[in-house]
Amino acid sequence: MAKLAICGGKSAVPQNRKWAKWPISDEADVKLVARITRSNRWSYDGPTEWEFAEKFTAYQGAKYGMCCANGTVGIQLALEALGIGAYDEVIVPAMTWQATAAACVDVNAIPVLVDIEPDTWNLDLDAVEAAITPKTRAIIVVHLYGCMTDLTRLQKICKKNNLFLIEDCAHQHGSFWKGKGVGSFGDVSSWSFQESKVLSSGEGGFNMCKTKDLFYKLYSLRNCGRPYEASPAVFGLTKPANMAATTLQSGNYRLTEWQAALLLGGLKRLDKQVKLRDANAIRLNTLLADIPGILPMRRRSEITQQSYFNFAFRIDPKELKVDNRQFCVALNMELGVPELFEPPYEPLNNCGLFKPQTKTRHILNATYWKAVNPKRFRVSVATNAHENCGVVAHHQILMNTASDMELLAGVVKKIVDNIDELRSVKPAALKKYQALAR
Ligand SMILES: Cc1ncc(COP(=O)(O)O)c(C=O)c1O
């Protein structure tokens, strides 16, 4: 008789089982949103926005920060504030959400895709060093899923080669490296508050930066080019000495007071939630490490608190003789939640949503057009993670109880123990089983 749910056996978890939901809010959030609705301050340098900006920046240990429209725009503003533009090369990890590279193209820079480490899926720093050319101006590090690259070495590489460091922190609100918050390491960092993120206002973004001058530039860039008037004065900053120099060509990338209200509420809960996810991830990784053919991701010893946008692990396809798609569908069938576990992002050299050669505004000249073609990059580790070994789930699975982590590991073990059954499921039939789990 079949044991695995995908083969007609009994699922490991009852179909009506309730899992933690995301996003979440509380009554205090609802009250603040209502207060803003009744007020006549809905946007534009509002008090809620700046209260949040100062508190979030302090939490991550950065110097200055401000809200912006979303995490895609945040990267674009970071690049523009650093003066990066046409024909400049920017190193970007091959595995990330497409926005990291798309923002480079939107400022007419050239994203240079670099492969990732097999056990963290974050930037491979040997590959980074090999990709640096005289045209390189910046490196964008993405603290991806629940791992980090060696930030200390990365800072040294930037210093040695006179490159800007931009941190894309969309996945890691509340992560700390050697006790210092991510987002405070780069010249500028960018954050996303999109619905799925661990700090969320539905949509929204944020930039942190190291210097006053970068703050003034970012302020102007997000606010139609207007200079910072210190009204209100934030971060103890007065008006820039030369206001004209901070008046820039730009558009409107601001965020509303309602979004800021949700963010203030979310920030109050953030650290406790990050700690819960981190403790559960450590527990789950310890259990997964004991299962043959399952490889947890590497956690560097310098990480003092790890935030998880997604929880990831790898299967060994050679040992198990199945791939990650087969494994994910089997897991989802056992848990009764369609698409809970999925392969990680498509590598950007072959990503359905990263198509830089489709907008006429990007046709600067034939050389540029060729340079932004993502197909020219070979990124075998990112490809293997997406196509063969990577398994990823949204952070809400880590917001359940410690005993749920035992249950999840038990489900993974059940599949491994009965891997012969899974091997017998034809890949072509996987789609049908995915539909059955709905
Ligand atoms: C790594 C990364 N960077 C940037 C973004 C873009 O953020 P947003 O969706 O807020 O534009 C995302 C969003 O998923 C992301 O995951």
Image (spheres, grey):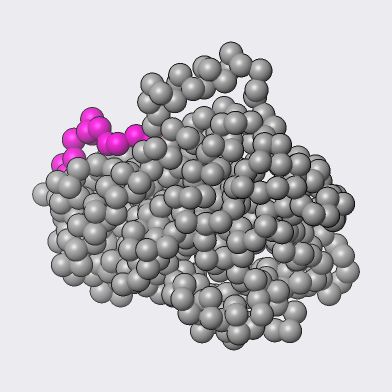
| Near-viewer residue (261 or 120) | 261
- Magenta part of the protein: which range? 9-23
> Where is 8 relative to 148, above or below?
above
* Left or right: where 88 falls relative to 281: right
* Left or right: where 101 falls relative to 328: right
Q: Is residue 324 visible?
A: no
> Where is 245 relative to 15, above or below?
below
Name of the residue lying farthest toward the top: 38
Dividing the picture into quadrants, the one containing residue 43 is top right
What's the residue at 34%, 34% (across, down)? 21
> Where is 378 relative to 281, above or below?
below
Please tell me whether residue 425 belongs to the stretch shown in magenta: no
| Near-viewer residue (187 or 242) | 242
* Left or right: where 45 falls relative to 152: right
| Near-viewer residue (25 or 316) | 25
* Left or right: where 129 falls relative to 199: right
Give the image location of residue 286, x and y in percent: 19, 63
Tally of numbered discs: 0
Q: Is residue 230 visible?
A: yes
Give the image location of residue 25, x and y in percent: 40, 29
What's the residue at 43%, 40% (across, down)? 267
What's the residue at 86%, 71% (across, down)? 366
| Near-viewer residue (69 or 211) | 211
Please tell me whether residue 20 belongs to the stretch shown in magenta: yes
Q: Secondary structure of the magenta portion, mostly?
A: loop
What's the residue at 52%, 76% (across, down)? 154
Give the image location of residue 94, x and y in percent: 56, 68
Q: Which image quarter is the C terminus in?
A: top left
Give the image location of residue 426, x and y in percent: 34, 57
